[in-house]
């Protein structure tokens, strides 16, 4: 089976403490998980044996999905419904809703990989390849599990569900989604009108400035706003790191030149409920900054610079005093547990441990560059430090770039940064 195009996981933004409200995260309302096909579903059989022929099942599912994809692209509801087993049942309604969602999202290309022989018609996992008009400059891939059934001489889909641990297309993860379209935003989700409208306003404000700063950045960005943890997990929203621990994620495939071609921002539903309006604006602006940079610069900068720069842009409009935002970092510096070197990848990884101090320290590194050398120099450093190799390789690239951009090497810059942290801590 053809492999997936290269994908780089984007930032996993922490929940911004000074911009959050409440002591506990909001509870998850829950949603249906992948289920077995309804009791009326029976596995297809050949004319000569009661055991499904795996090759025949694969061929039939290939043809069925091809008809289904053609119906989606044409917006032919009747042809699509003809592929659904029990369109009035729960699983059937979910599929029909998914058609409307796919059309609202603007699916303009949709295919699936050729199937290997299928042993279990109730659990046929397929890689879909798709592209959305107006936001995608390249192809996305996603995994979907189908339950298929033989009905007379034909075939139908009994259920279409996400695959655990794999990103699903938005219309499969959130078949009941609504869409907001503006000049610069496609915001889709199930979180309700107010949440979608708020996200669209942030995109409208942030994207024009980002496209001026980063030539090549997309002029329209897709933001996904799920209402439940299960939906976020199905979208690949980083919920595996712990519900609410990560406020948002960005990911997408990279083109041949190492630039992102079809990023999505996924907002975590529990974090979204806990954050203040200003906090949600900061988080989404941070993510939009990553989208702009990833689409403009091949590869990525070292994590401390990538995250620090995104926070530099994101925090610019925060309505909370800087001292409050920096409180966890300054407290760590005062008690002797503050960072002594620029944050590495593990310091910014929620799967490893608490990342609040690491993010704040990275932010202050970016702030130091901007204050001493200017915004253009900070952007130049991001470009100069980026590469398509390993994190270690990009750090070495950054070491070579620092003297030209900053007039000092890593040791000198780290000393300036530590002095800054000490001054902030008083």
Image (cartoon, rainbow, N blue to C red):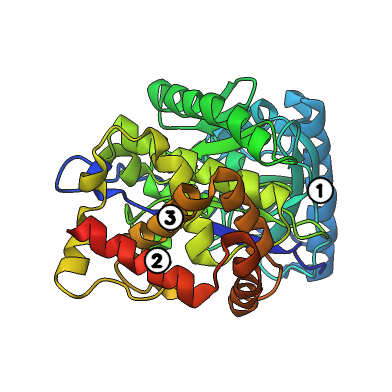
Specify the label residue 111 is tagged with. Answer: 1
| Callouts 2 and 1 close, C-beta under 8 Å | no
* Mark 3 → mark 1, Cα distance in angstroms: 48 Å
On screen, residue 277 versus residue 412, left or right, reads left
Q: Mark 3 against mark 1, which lies toward the viewer? A: 3
Q: Residue at x 72, y 70 (%)?
A: 51
Please, which residue is most extreme toward the front here? 407
* Mark 2 → mark 3, Cα distance in angstroms: 8 Å
Q: To which residue does mark 3 refer?
A: 368
On screen, residue 53 versus residue 160, left or right, reads right
Specify the label residue 416 is tagged with. Answer: 2
Q: Residue at x 55, y 30 (%)?
A: 187
Label 3: element kind: helix
Crowding near pointer 3: few (<14 within 10 Å), some, many (20+)?
some
Depth check: 81 or 409 in front? 409
Give the image location of residue 162, x and y in percent: 56, 53
Q: Residue at x 73, y 38 (%)?
A: 83
Which is nearer the N-term, disc 2 or disc 1?
A: 1
């Amino acid at each position: 089976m053809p492999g997936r195009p290269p994908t780089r996981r984007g930032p996993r933004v922490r929940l911004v403490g000074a911009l959050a409200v409440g002591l506990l995260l909001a509870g998850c309302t829950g949603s249906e998980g992948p289920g077995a096909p309804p009791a009326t579903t029976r596995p297809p059989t050949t004319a000569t044996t009661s055991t499904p022929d795996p090759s025949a099942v694969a061929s039939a599912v290939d043809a069925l999905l091809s008809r289904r994809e053609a119906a989606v692209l044409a917006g032919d509801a009747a042809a699509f419904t003809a592929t659904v087993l029990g369109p009035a049942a729960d699983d059937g309604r979910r599929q029909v809703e998914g058609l409307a969602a796919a059309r609202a999202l603007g699916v303009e290309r949709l295919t699936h990989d050729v199937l290997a022989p299928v042993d279990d018609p109730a659990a046929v996992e397929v890689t879909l390849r798709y592209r959305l008009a107006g936001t995608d400059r390249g192809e996305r891939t996603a995994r979907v599990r189908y339950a298929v059934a033989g009905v007379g001489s034909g075939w139908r889909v009994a259920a279409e569900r996400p695959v655990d641990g794999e990103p699903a297309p938005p219309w499969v993860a959130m078949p009941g989604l609504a869409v907001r379209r503006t000049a610069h935003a496609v915001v889709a989700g199930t979180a309700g009108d107010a949440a979608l409208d708020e996200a669209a306003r942030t995109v409208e404000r942030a994207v024009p400035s980002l496209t001026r700063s980063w030539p090549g950045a997309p002029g329209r960005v897709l933001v996904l706003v799920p209402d439940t943890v299960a939906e976020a997990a199905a979208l690949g929203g980083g919920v595996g790191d712990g519900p609410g621990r990560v406020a948002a994620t960005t990911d997408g495939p990279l083109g041949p030149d190492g630039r992102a071609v079809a990023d999505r921002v996924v907002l975590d539903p529990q974090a979204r409920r806990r954050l203040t309006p200003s906090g949600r604006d900061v988080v989404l602006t941070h993510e939009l900054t990553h989208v702009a940079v990833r689409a403009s610069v091949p590869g990525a900068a070292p994590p401390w610079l990538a995250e620090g720069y995104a926070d530099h842009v994101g925090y610019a409009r925060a309505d909370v005093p800087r001292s409050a935002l920096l409180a966890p970092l300054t407290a760590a510096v005062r008690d002797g547990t503050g960072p002594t070197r620029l944050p590495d990848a593990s310091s910014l990884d929620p799967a490893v441990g608490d990342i609040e101090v690491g993010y704040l320290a990275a932010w202050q590194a970016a702030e130091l560059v901007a204050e001493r050398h200017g915004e253009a120099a900070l952007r130049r450093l991001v470009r100069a430090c980026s590469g398509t190799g390993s994190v270690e390789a990009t750090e070495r690239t950054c070491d070579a770039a620092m003297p030209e951009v900053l007039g000092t090497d890593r040791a000198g810059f780290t000393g300036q940064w530590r002095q800054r942290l000490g001054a902030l801590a008083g």
